Amino acid sequence: MVLPGSEGKMIRSVTDFDGWASERAAAELDEPFTFVIGMDAGLRLASRRSEHVACAGGGRVLSAGEMGFSRESGRWAVIEVSNQSTGYCPDISSWPAVAETLDRAGFDRPDGFTHELVFRRCERCQQHNIVREGEFVCVFCGSDLPATWNVDPATGDKGS
């Protein structure tokens, strides 16, 4: 259950981010933030130690991960973005939703995820796995993992 008011801050523009960032401690700005792109294509940000599902207010998402910012030439830019969210397990194919949202908000950004994680659900034991070094083997039961992504893109729920 997600507590009311625990969702991340909606960021619609660089100006929104600048105002929100001015309320953050310098140490917090030095590390990436938890982010989600909601079904409304809106960007929500929260402290890195926040859960993605809480940041999204418990809702479905188009993408999720961590996002780092830097001030460049007097304005904020996104310098790193990952799909690192074990709550939603987004596929790397969710990048276009992230890019479109950042472009609409006016952020300079990388051309893709700067750190990509490959998530798979084990069809035998139903556990979510992070595929490491191209080894598509479940760390929980040793079964082979599917070559194609099989976790619900919007919720991270186990598929059928």
Image: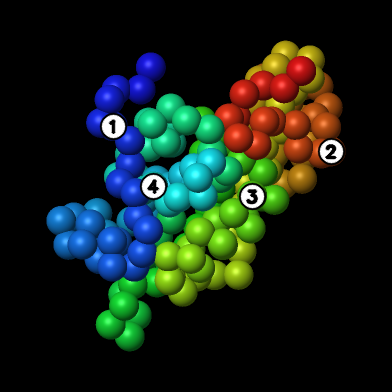
Left or right for 103, reference 139: left
x and y, in percent, of residue 44 in the image: 39, 47
Disc 1 residue type (three-letter) = Ser
Most extreme residue toward the front is 40
Dot 3 or dot 4: first in sequence order is 4
Give me the residue at 42% from left, 65% from top. Answer: 105
Instruction: For mark 2, give the secondary structure.
Output: loop
**Pointer 1 or 3: first along the chain:** 1
* Dot 1 or dot 4, earlier in sequence: 1
Q: Which quarter of the figure is the N terminus placed in?
A: top left
Tell me which amino acid carries mark 3. Ser
- Kindly identify which numbered label has been placed on residue 147: 2
Q: Is residue 73 visible?
A: yes
Q: CA distance from mark 1 to mark 2?
A: 36 Å
Q: Which residue is mark 4?
A: 44
For the point 67% across and 44% down, the residue is 91
Q: Residue at x 38, y 31 (%)?
A: 57
Q: In terms of sequence position, does the residue under pointer 2 or pointer 3 come before the other?
A: 3
Question: Which residue does the numbered mark 1 point to in the structure image?
Answer: 6
Q: Which residue is mark 3?
A: 94
Amino acid type, callout 4: Arg
> In the image, is 38 to the left or to the right of 153?
left
- Separation (CA) of disc 1 from disc 4: 11 Å
Which class describes the residues within 10 Å of circle 4: few (<14), some (14-19), or many (20+)?
many
The residue sitting at the top extreme is 125
First along the sequence among labels 1 and 2: 1
Q: Residues within 10 Å of mark 2 (few under 14, many from 20)?
A: few
Residue 144 shown left or right of residue 99 in the figure: right
Q: Amino acid at mark 2?
A: Ala
Instruction: Give the spatial CA distance, label 1 vs label 3.
Output: 24 Å
Tell me if label 1 and label 4 are in contact, CB under 8 Å. Answer: no
Q: Is residue 160 above or below residue 39?
A: above
